[in-house]
Amino acid sequence: MTGYEVIRRDGLARLSVLATPHGPLHLPAAVDTRDLFPDLANRELSNVPLTAPEDFARQYHLRGKGQPVTIHPAIEPDASSGDCIIVPGWHTALSNPRGYVEWLVRLKEAVPPDTAWYAPGTALPSNAHILCYSGFDLFDYTAVDLKTAQGRFCLPEGDFPGKVMDEGICSCPGCRESDLLQHNRFALERELALIRQFIALHQVREFVESRSRMTAEHVAIIRHLDSRNRFMEERIPVVRDARLGAMSGDALFRPEVRRFAARVLDRYLPPPGDVAVLLPCSARKPYSLSQSHRRFAGAVAGRAVELIVTSPLGLVPREIERIYPAAHYDIPVTGYWDREELSITASALAGFLSRHPCRRIIAHLDGGALQAAAMAADICEKEFECTGGDRPASDGALKRLSEALEGERVVRHDIVRGTLSYQFGVDVDTRGMAVRWKNLDLLVRKGKNPLFSLDPGTGLLRPTFEGWKLIPEGYRVIIDDFPVRGDILAPGVISADPRILEGDEVLVEGPQALATGRAAMPAFEMEASSRGIAVRVRKVLKE
C-alpha cells in the first residue's frame, strides 16, 4: 500500500500527495513512472482493451504484484484505500466520449475515493486538462515522447510540425536549445502546473471549457459527464467562494447550476405574499448592491415577492441572492437569449409559480427575460402584467411598477427562513429572531443567544449549537468515541448524512464530542476514505 491523500478537490479534479520511495509527489504531475513503480517492467504486453468483454478480460487481466494496481471496466476492481490504480489503454478512450464517461463512472464508483489514478501513455499538453478534470492524477512522458519521435511540436492548442519550433512560439529551454524532446516534456509539465493552479482556485471547469473548444471529443466528454446528474452532483461542492464563469451554453447543464435550480423549486420557501414581481438580473452581485436593483427596491417598497429572472440559473429569489452560485456567476451580456436559455428559464419560472401560486404576477422585464416570462405564462396558464418597457430601470418604468403595486400590503421578507429552507430543506419558525446586518455580515439572535451567522463568501448560514436545535435532523456526521481537538479525519467517521456535500455546514456528534464545522468532502468519501480531512471544525462544545 502507498500513502495517498487528497488535499483539495474541485469536482473530480484533485490536488493530492502520493508518498513514494523518492519522497512526496504532488499531483497532478508527470513523472518517469518506471522508476516509481518497478513492477511495471513485469507487465509488458499484458494490456486488455477497454472494450473487452468480461470473459476475455478475466482471462488476460493482470492486476500486478505491487503498485500501481491494474483495473479494467469489465472487472470488479481489486484496489484498496491508498493504492495507486492504473487504467491501461486509457488513451484509446479519448476518441470515444460516451465510452470514456461510461467506463470512468463505472470505475470511479467501484474504487475507493482515496486512490491515485494513473493514465499511462495518454497525457499530452492538449489533453491534460480533460484527464485531470475527469479525475486522473498521475501521468508519464510516453505520449509526448512518441510525438517527439514523430517530429511533432506539442502545445496545449494541439501538435504541429517540428519546424514550428523555430517560429518563436515558445521560449522554453528546449526551444532555446532546439531540443524537441525537452520542449514537449516541458509543455506537458507547464500545462499540469497551470491545471494545479486552477484546481486550487476552484475554477478548473472554466479552464477546461476554454481548452476543450479546440477538440470536439473533449466538449463531448464534458457534456456526457454533465448528464450524469447523481454522479457529478455528489462530487461538486455545494458552494464555492470563486467565480462561476458561464461563458457558453454548456453552463446551463453544470451540476451546480442544475442543483441551484432544483433547490429553488423543491426546497426554497418564499415569504408569504400573493404578489410577485419578476426583475432582470444585474452585472453586479449580489443584485441588491447594484444601482438598478436599488431603484427597483425603491419602486417595489417591499410590497411583493421579488424574483430575479436570469440565465443560466433561471430564477433567483431575493432572499437567497447571496448563495453560491447566485452571487458568483459571470455571463457575457449581449441581450440575446437562445432557445435553450429561454426554454430552461421559462420552465424554472413556470414550475416555481405553479408550486407557489400568486394572485398577481408583474413582469418588470425586457428582452430575453421578458420572452422567457411570456413562455412561462403560457406553460402555467397565468396572466402576467408587464411594466418594464424597453428599459426597466428608467424613471418611467419604475413609476409604472410603483403604480401597479399601489394598495398592496407589505410582504415580510425573511432571509433567514429562505436561506435555511434552501440550505437544509427545513422550515424554521423565525418569529422572535433579531437579524443584524453589518456590511455584508449578518448575525441572527433570539434573545441573547446567537443562532446563525452568514458566511459572506458563500452566502450560507453557519449555525451555532443553539441554531442546530432548530434543524432537528440531517446534516449530521457521526464520529467514533474520541474527543475533538481539531479537524475531523475520515478514519474517525462512522456515518454521515448522504445529503452532505463538500462545503455543507454540518453538526459533528460523538460519545465524547459535539462540534460544528464545514464538510471538507462529500458523505460517501467520509465513509469510504481512510485518510484526509472530513470536517473542518469551527467550534467544539465544551462541557
Image (cartoon, rainbow, N blue to C red):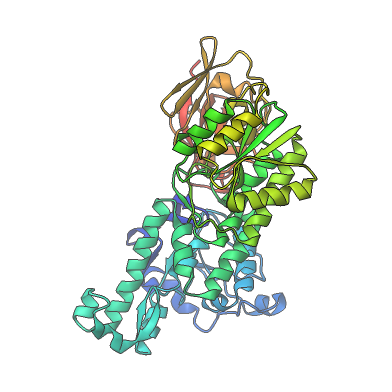
Across and down, in percent, residue 203 comes to 44, 54
> Which residue shows up at 70% across the image and 37% down it?
361
Left or right of 453 in this view: 384: right
Q: Looking at the image, is 146 positioned above or below residue 230?
A: below
Instruction: Inspect this view and state whether residue 347 appears.
Output: no
Quarter of the view holding residue 75? bottom right
Across and down, in percent, residue 184 comes to 32, 78
Quarter of the view holding residue 60? bottom right
Left or right of 506 in this view: 267: right
Q: Looking at the image, is 479 positioned above or below residue 203?
A: above
Q: Looking at the image, is 125 positioned above or below residue 486?
A: below
> Which residue shows up at 19% across the image and 79% down it?
176
Q: Nearer the viewer, residue 185 or 348?
A: 348
Instruction: Inspect this view and state whether residue 300 appears.
Output: yes
Which residue is situated farthest in the left direction here?
177
Which residue is situated farthest in the front direction here?
396
Q: Nearer the viewer, residue 466 or 534?
A: 466
Left or right of 48 in this view: 214: left
Number of numbered discs: 0
Which residue is situated farthest in the top direction here?
447
> Which residue shows up at 32% across the image and 67% down it?
190
Q: Looking at the image, is 188 positioned above or below residue 311?
A: below
Across and down, in percent, residue 211 comes to 44, 68
Across and down, in percent, residue 23 comes to 32, 58
> Which residue shows up at 33% across the image and 68% down it?
189
